[in-house]
Image (cartoon, rainbow, N blue to C red):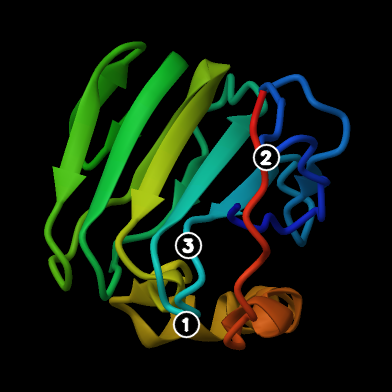
Amino acid sequence: MGMNLTMIKAIQGHIDSSFDDDRWMLAPGDSGIRLNFWFMGDDPDGPVVTCSVYPPNPDGKENAPAHSHSSDTIRIVVEGRFKVGTKWYEAGEMRIQDAGRIYGPEVVGPDGCKQIIIFEKRSSIFPNYVKDEDTRAHAAGKEAFSKLMAPFNQPRAASPAAVSR
């Protein structure tokens, strides 16, 4: 069973959750983003699924500047709207992004957004910003995120087999 950043416990081999789950964490800073990270498998750099709830953005403020990630990603908009560059993605649409390719900026729609992002590698969650000033501006967030992730970047012992009902 994959682990998750908020340490939600598995019961009988599975975890029940939703975008309204109050056990999810708030992202570092004052963005108001609620999220959880679901780590798949035991590889310390294995895949991770992030589920995020972005608050309404009536002013169209940029959420993230142009950046890349060092792994392939799949983004699925579940509710609301989300803009990457000049393209708006609606509920039910997805974007598959190649590793190392620059994209953005990102903007959440006026009514907020719920989305799922799947990263090929855990180590690639935090973005590589294009501009040095963006890297500096997000340094504190990266440090806080690195501390949160540290326990999950270690090899884990295999768990005993369990019967799932």
Kind of residue sitting beneath label 1: Thr
Q: Earlier in the sequence, mark 2 or mark 3?
A: 2
Q: Earlier in the sequence, mark 1 or mark 2?
A: 2
Q: Quadrant of residue 13?
A: top right
Specify few, some or many for label 1: CA neighbours under 10 Å numbering under 14, 14-19, or 20 or more.
some
The disc label shown at residue 13, or none: 2
The disc label shown at residue 41, or none: 3
Q: Quadrant of the C terminus?
A: top right
Q: CA distance from mark 2 to mark 3?
A: 13 Å
Residue at 58 percent across and 75 percent down: it is 138
Say left or right for 125 vs 136: left
Nearest to the observer: residue 19 or residue 13: 13
Point out residue 80 in the picture as x, y percentages from the top left corner. Answer: 47, 13
Residue at 69 percent across and 85 percent down: it is 150
Residue at 20 percent across and 36 percent down: it is 95
User: How many labels, in total?
Assistant: 3
Nearest to the observer: residue 91 or residue 24: 24
Point out residue 38 in the picture as x, y percentages from the top left corner. Answer: 58, 50
Label 2 with label 3: CB-CB less than 8 Å: no
Q: Earlier in the sequence, mark 1 or mark 3?
A: 3
Nearest to the observer: residue 1 or residue 109: 1
Kind of residue sitting beneath label 3: Gly
Point out residue 46 in the picture as x, y percentages from the top left corner. Answer: 40, 70
The disc label shown at residue 145, or none: none
Kind of residue sitting beneath label 2: Gly
Q: Nearer the viewer, mark 2 or mark 3?
A: 2
* Local SS, label 3: loop
Residue at 26 percent across and 53 percent down: it is 73
Q: Nearer the viewer, mark 1 or mark 3?
A: 3
Q: CA distance from mark 1 to mark 2?
A: 39 Å
- Which residue position holds label 1? 135
Say left or right for 20 vs 113: right
